[in-house]
Image (cartoon, grey):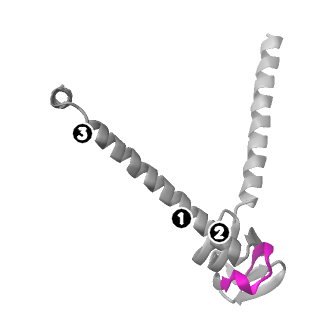
Amino acid sequence: MKHIKQKHSLIIFTFILLFSFNSIILNSNAQDEEVLSLGIRKNVGAAFGDKIEGTFTISGSGPDSILNLTLFFNGTQVDFESDNQLSFRFDTNDYSLGLMNITLVGEDSEGIIYSKSISKEFISPEIGNWIIAIAIGITLISVGLKLLVSYLNNKRIDKQSPTDKKNKIKIDIDKEFL
């Protein structure tokens, strides 16, 4: 009987321990929740992964409790908005080439500071043009291959004898009625 009580105590202790860990994990995840959103949209130019060149628009926002937003490029302030919405249009040619840390900082009514960062690599227009040219080349080659395969399939069908074509039609019709 004493063994069963110890077993029940161990099970209850295990559940309490698991519940405690679960609560700690949920609370830590709640604190990691993103308050600010930060996005970048291409207007004109090239974007290949994190490599960008051309004109882009950055959009940032936060909840209603955010009083102001500040945008930084590699620690240098490039825009400020005394609101919870920010939109900033820029050209990569106006900044140095290389890795750019883009950070949005917001302050709420209680003085709490929030931030969100993304990294992009600003590349030269020449590299951007090469990326566009390669993308167009790959697209043209894939469309060309698709057309070639379709053409070759049609040629193969045209070379079939009338009897083979008739049998093919009969098989296709039979499949539809099953």
The residues colored magenta run: 90-107
Front disc: 3 or 1:
3
Q: Residue at x 63, y 73 (%)?
A: 129
In the displayed structure image, the side of residue 98 where residue 163 appears, left or right:
left
Q: Are marks 3 and 2 in contact (CB under 8 Å)?
A: no
Whether residue 100 is in magenta: the answer is yes
User: Looking at the picture, which amino acid does disc 1 mark?
Assistant: Ile
Q: Position of residue 101 (x, y in %)?
A: 79, 72
- Check disc 2 and report the residue beneath it: 130
- Real-space Cα distance between discs 1 and 2? 10 Å
Q: Residue at x 44, y 54 (%)?
A: 144
Q: Are marks 3 and 1 in contact (CB under 8 Å)?
A: no
Whether residue 14 is in magenta: the answer is no
Q: Position of residue 150 (x, y in %)?
A: 35, 46
Q: Main secondary structure of the magenta part?
A: strand
Q: Residue at x 83, y 84 (%)?
A: 76
Crowding around mark 3 (Cα neighbors within 10 Å: few <14, some 14 to 19, many 20+) is few
Determine the image quadrant of residue 50.
bottom right
Question: Which quadrant of the figure contains the N terminus?
Answer: top right
Element type at mark 2: helix
Q: Is residue 50 above or below residue 84?
A: above
Q: Residue at x 55, y 58 (%)?
A: 138
Question: Which quadrant of the figure contains the C terminus?
Answer: top left
Q: Are marks 1 and 2 in contact (CB under 8 Å)?
A: no
| Earlier sequence position, callout 1 versus callout 2 | 2
- Check disc 1 and report the residue beneath it: 136
| Earlier sequence position, callout 3 versus callout 2 | 2
In the displayed structure image, the side of residue 48 where residue 21 appears, left or right:
right
Determine the image quadrant of residue 109.
bottom right
User: Looking at the picture, which amino acid does disc 2 mark?
Assistant: Trp
In the displayed structure image, the side of residue 118 where residue 3 appears, left or right:
right
Q: Residue furthest top?
A: 1
